[in-house]
Image (cartoon, rainbow, N blue to C red):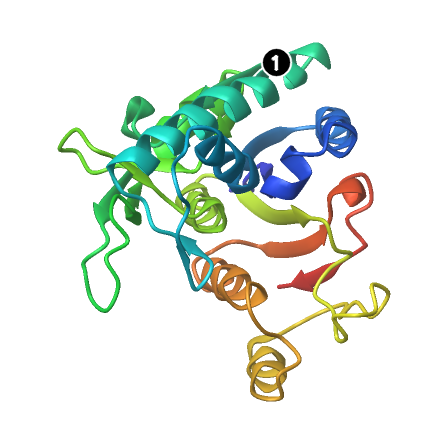
């Protein structure tokens, strides 16, 4: 049986922070026909809000250490301010949407990250995504908008990387839909030269990716993003596109992983 197509879009915190860029992305997403899911970040705003409250932000290897005070901040910012801002924008474009974190409908259950060399605090590693529960919303014509928060089933909210949520949700929905996962951010795609925005690598397979990593072409935050991308392809997702936030209306752009 042929599965229906589903577009799962992840938008980063820098786009969420830019009103015109966010409005453009929401407009483009609303114009896409068919089934859709949106996952958003919000780390930039969380850092600003924490600072305004006198709470220091600690990052280790690009990951936020989430102590008791910081989990309150990210819950307020991600599930509150950012999530409802995005949902209301979608409604303004005629797209019916519902904002969720992982605890809602028990859609994403996580384990608290174990302490090894670093204690990340209330940070979650995704254990299970309930694709069936999400599909009931999608089939009713609603666009789920997922904040980067999950829960542990013991009453604790867990800060969880938005790229990981997008990837794990794509995997969870792959049993029900023909899923294309799009990572939207402020660059044109995966770049061969970090200083040249036009040096987009049009397509990547696992072998090329490993070679680019060993040569130091692909580094830093792009590595976990691509690790997530290849993990989804190996778990039933049809295609991953890494592209600029204003390219949703033309997904021939960017970097393609199949």
Q: Position of residue 125 (x, y in %)?
A: 29, 51
In the structure shown, which secondary structural element does the residue marked by tag 1 occupy? Answer: helix
**Residue for point 61% across, 13% down:** 88
Q: Is residue 73 above or below residue 119?
A: above
Q: Is residue 192 above or below residue 46?
A: below
Frontmost residue, 177 versus 63: 63
Where's the C terminus, which quadrant? bottom right
Visible in this render: residue 116? yes
**Residue for point 75% across, 26% down:** 23
Q: Position of residue 195 (x, y in %)?
A: 79, 70
Frontmost residue, 5 versus 105: 105
Residue indicated by mark 1: 88
Which residue is the extreme one toward the front? 54
Q: Position of residue 83 (x, y in %)?
A: 51, 24
Q: Is residue 72 above or below residue 109?
A: above
Visible in this render: residue 139? no
User: How dense is the environment of label 1, judged by Cα within 10 Å: few (below 14), some, or many (20 and up)?
Assistant: some
Which residue is the extreme one toward the left? 154
Q: Is residue 78 left or right of residue 213?
A: left
**Residue for point 43% across, 48% down:** 161
Q: Is residue 211 left or right of residue 138?
A: right
Q: Is residue 48 left or right of residue 101?
A: right
**Quadrant of residue 148 in the image?**
top left
Q: Position of residue 68 (x, y in %)?
A: 24, 36
């Amino acid at each position: 049986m042929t599965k229906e197509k589903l577009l799962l879009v992840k938008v980063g915190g820098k786009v969420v922070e830019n009103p015109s860029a966010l409005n453009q992305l929401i407009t483009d997403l609303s114009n896409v026909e068919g089934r859709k899911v949106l996952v958003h970040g919000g780390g930039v705003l969380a850092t600003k809000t924490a600072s305004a409250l006198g709470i220091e932000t600690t990052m280790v290897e690009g990951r936020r250490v989430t102590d008791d005070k910081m989990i309150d901040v990210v819950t307020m910012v991600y599930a509150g301010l950012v999530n409802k801002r995005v949902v209301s924008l979608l409604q303004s474009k005629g797209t019916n949407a519902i904002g969720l974190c992982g605890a809602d409908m028990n859609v994403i259950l996580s384990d608290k990250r174990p302490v090894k060399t670093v204690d990340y605090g209330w940070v979650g590693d995704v254990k299970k995504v309930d694709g069936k529960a999400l599909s009931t919303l999608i089939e009713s014509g609603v666009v789920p908008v997922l904040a980067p928060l999950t829960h542990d089933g013991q009453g604790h909210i867990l800060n969880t990387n938005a790229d990981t949520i997008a990837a794990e949700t794509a995997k969870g929905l792959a049993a029900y839909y023909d899923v294309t996962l799009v990572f939207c951010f402020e660059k044109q795609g995966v770049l061969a030269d970090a200083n040249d925005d036009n040096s987009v690598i049009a397509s990547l397979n696992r072998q090329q990716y490993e070679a680019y990593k060993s040569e130091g072409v692909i580094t830093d935050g792009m590595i976990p993003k691509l690790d997530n991308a290849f993990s989804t392809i190996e778990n039933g997702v049809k295609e991953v596109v890494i592209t600029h936030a204003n390219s949703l209306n033309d997904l021939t752009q960017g970097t393609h992983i199949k």
